[in-house]
Every structure is written in structure tokens, then in C-alpha cells.
Image (cartoon, grey):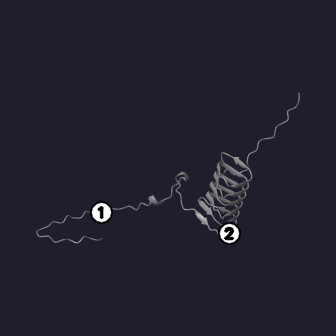
Amino acid sequence: MFSKTRVTEPGPRTQPTPEPEPARSLDTSYDLPASTPAARTRTTPSVLSSDLTVTGNIQTQGDVQVEGTVEGDIRAHQLIVGESATIRGEIVAEEVVVNGRVVGRVRGLKVRLTATARVEGDIIHKTIAIESGAHFEGSVQRQEDPLANGVTPKLAPPVARDAE
């Protein structure tokens, strides 16, 4: 290791004996990812630039920001549709922010359509916000768990009762 240069001073001087360093154990537990989704830390989203066209489905546990064109379904934790983006397919995410164009169904816990949004399709949500100026054609339905796979439950038709 490195040592400090000694300044010579007049007179006798005693040097303390250095104590040996304790043995160190290699502890790497500090850089292990959290095992629970609730403790998930936010990361930088994957960005699909405006000059990119994707044909096919996209699936991730992380966040995605689309600025280009996607011809297929997207499943993500959070999805941001940029102003220049066009998505033709189903979107399934916990949080969806639409600034651009979506042609297809949107399913999300939190869905937000900004003033520049253009959506043609149904929205199934837990909470929704539609800003003034957004263009939306389709139906809106609230569900407690819009991310669950399956079809929207319908009421049973009324049963005819026999006359007695």
C-alpha cells in the first residue's frame, strides 16, 4: 500500500506497531435485485425511435417509450406512446400514456389520453384521464382488474319464467 512520507523531527520517536487488518469477506448482496415486484426500482425506459418500424409483438416487464411505428401487440409495465408514434394492435400495461395514435384495444390500470392523443378502439381501465383535445372513438369500460386475460364479462340474458 501507500505510506505517508515521514517528517524528520529532532529527538527519538517511537513508531506504533501497525495492527493487522481484519480478514474481509466478499459480500455482494448489496447489488442483487429485489425479489419482490413492489420493491421494483424505476429504470430508464426502452425507447423505439421515430425512424423505427416494428412488425410483431413486444413484451417486457419494464417500461417502453414508442416514438415510431409498431404493427403488433405491446405488453409492458409502463407504455408511453409518443406524439409521432402509431401503434396498430392491443396495448396491455399497468400504466399507459397516449400522446400519439393507437388503433386497437387499450387495457391498463391507469390510462391517460393527452390532448394530442388519437385512439380508435376500446379502452378497458381501472382509472382513466382524457385531456381536452384528445380524439377517441370506441367504448370505455372500467374493470377492477383490466390486465387479467380473458374477455370482458357480460351479464347473463334474462330467463323467461313459465306462467303458472
Amino acid bearing label 2:
Thr
Residue situated in front as seen by the camera: 49 or 71? 49
In this rendering, the answer to whether 3 lies above or below 26 is below
Helix, strand or loop at disc 2? strand
Residue 13: horizontal and vertical position, in percent?
14, 67
Please give the count of numbered marks on the rendered protein: 2
Residue 23: horizontal and vertical position, in percent?
33, 62
In this rendering, the answer to whether 142 lies above or below 91 is above
Residue situated in front as seen by the camera: 18 or 6? 6
- Give me the residue at 53% from left, 57% from top: 42
Residue 124: horizontal and vertical position, in percent?
69, 50
- Give me the residue at 69% from left, 60% from top: 101
Residue situated in front as seen by the camera: 77 or 137? 137
Amino acid bearing label 1:
Glu
Q: Residue furthest right?
A: 163
Number of other residues with Cα within 10 Å of mark 1, as a class: few under 14, some 14 to 19, many 20 or more: few
User: Does residue 102 appear to the left or right of 25 in the view shown?
Assistant: right
Which residue carries the number 1 mark? 21
Number of other residues with Cα within 10 Å of mark 2, as a class: few under 14, some 14 to 19, many 20 or more: some
Which residue carries the number 2 mark? 53
| 1 or 2: mark nearer the eye | 2
User: Does residue 63 appear to the left or right of 159 in the view shown?
Assistant: left
Quadrant in which the C terminus is drawn: top right
Q: Residue furthest top?
A: 164
Q: Quadrant of residue 80?
A: bottom right
Residue 143: horizontal and vertical position, in percent?
68, 46
Q: Quadrant of residue 73?
A: bottom right
